[in-house]
Image (cartoon, rainbow, N blue to C red):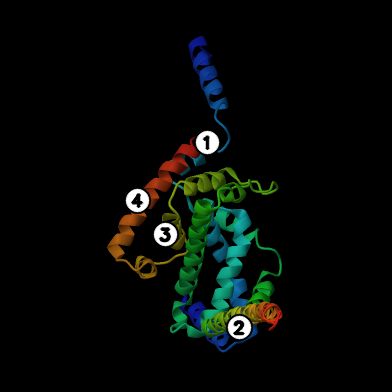
Amino acid sequence: MHPEEKAWNDLRTAASSRLRPGFAGRVLGAARGPGSGAWAALREAAAACLRPGFAARVLREARGAVMPSYASQFALSAATVVLCLAAVLFLQQRNQRLADERNLAEWRAIVAFAQEIDVPGR
Amino acid sequence: MDETSTTDLVDLVRRAQRGDEEALHDLIVTYQNRVAGFVFAITNRRDQVEDLSQQVFIKMVRAIGGLQAPSQFESWLFRLARNTCIDQLRRQKLRRIFLPFAAEHENIPEPPGAVDTEELDALRHALEHLRPQDRALLALVQEGRSHAEIAAVLSTSVAAVKARLHRAREHLREHYQSHHAP
């Protein structure tokens, strides 16, 4: 082989050894964008995320967890409001009664004291 | 899908609409991998695939009785899947606004064990750079939905779908090239 030809061959070999395997596929992939293989790999990777018995689990969840209806949510809200109002009214009446009892007791004490100091002939 | 399988699917959907557990089970098994792939394409998160796919099928089980045209089951199912994923991404975005550390919690690196091939890695990298709506658009095309069906799903015109699809493909190719350079 002619030395010059050998040198060119060596250059080609050295250059091609720098290309990673699958060079042609990567060039085509880069030029055309992701092909069906990439999308298929995505689907496979996603399918691998589903644990065995997925369908049975979905059906169990769908039947088990009952979605609250708007009516039931409204009823719950209304019941909460009624309970809160009842609690407020009860506390308010209780405080009022205690205050009345305290005031009456004070008045009785004042009346008793007034009667004591108002005894005729004293 | 050929005529026989379309008839089989319509029959399966009708049985499922009547509450046949076996038909519902068969429908889930038939579509679970495709829905999982669709969810993965939109969210790009392995750890969300099962949870979101489950949500999609639970919605399917609860709403299938109201499906007017059983022959439209596939496009109806993928519309459910698309809306479920987009809603989830919106909720995550809202959480990031109100909860300062939510983003850090949501961006936890995926657990080791699942190693992507070079091709899949490049596709995921490219999808990451697209808006969720565009990812959903490309995923719908990959699921064989026609432009007219996609237009119906997105409540827009066929021309608008074509334009958006062209832009989305351009972006995908651009980012795919940058990651998948020879």
Q: Nearer the viewer, mark 1 or mark 2?
A: 2
Closer to the camera in the image, A2 or B38? B38
Residue labelled with disc 3? B137
Are callouts 1 and 3 both on one chain? no
Disc 1 designates what residue?
A23
Residue beneath label 2, please? A86
- Label 1 CA crowd tier, 10 Å (few <14, some 14–19, many 20+): few
What residue is disc 4 on? B167
A74 to B90, vertically: above or below: below
* Chain of the residue under the numbered disc 1 shown in the image: A
Tell which residue pokes out farthest to the front in this image.
A121
**Residue B109 placement, left or right of B179:** right
- Which residue is nearer to you in this view: A102 or A91? A102
Q: What element carries label 4?
A: helix
Q: Looking at the picture, which amino acid does disc 2 mark?
A: Ala
The amino acid at mark 1 is: Phe
Asked if the residue under mark 3 is in contact with the one under mark 1, i.e. CB atoms within 8 Å, the reply is: no
CA–CA distance in space, label 2 to label 3: 54 Å
> How far apart are labels 3 and 4 at the CA level?
11 Å
Which chain is indicated by disc 4? Answer: B
Q: Could you tell me how far apart the alpha carbons at marks 4 and 1 are, in whole angstroms? A: 27 Å
Q: What residue type is labelled 3?
A: Leu
Q: In this view, does B76 lie to the left or right of B121?
A: left
Label 1 to label 2: alpha-carbon separation: 78 Å
Dot 3 falls on a residue whose secondary structure is: helix
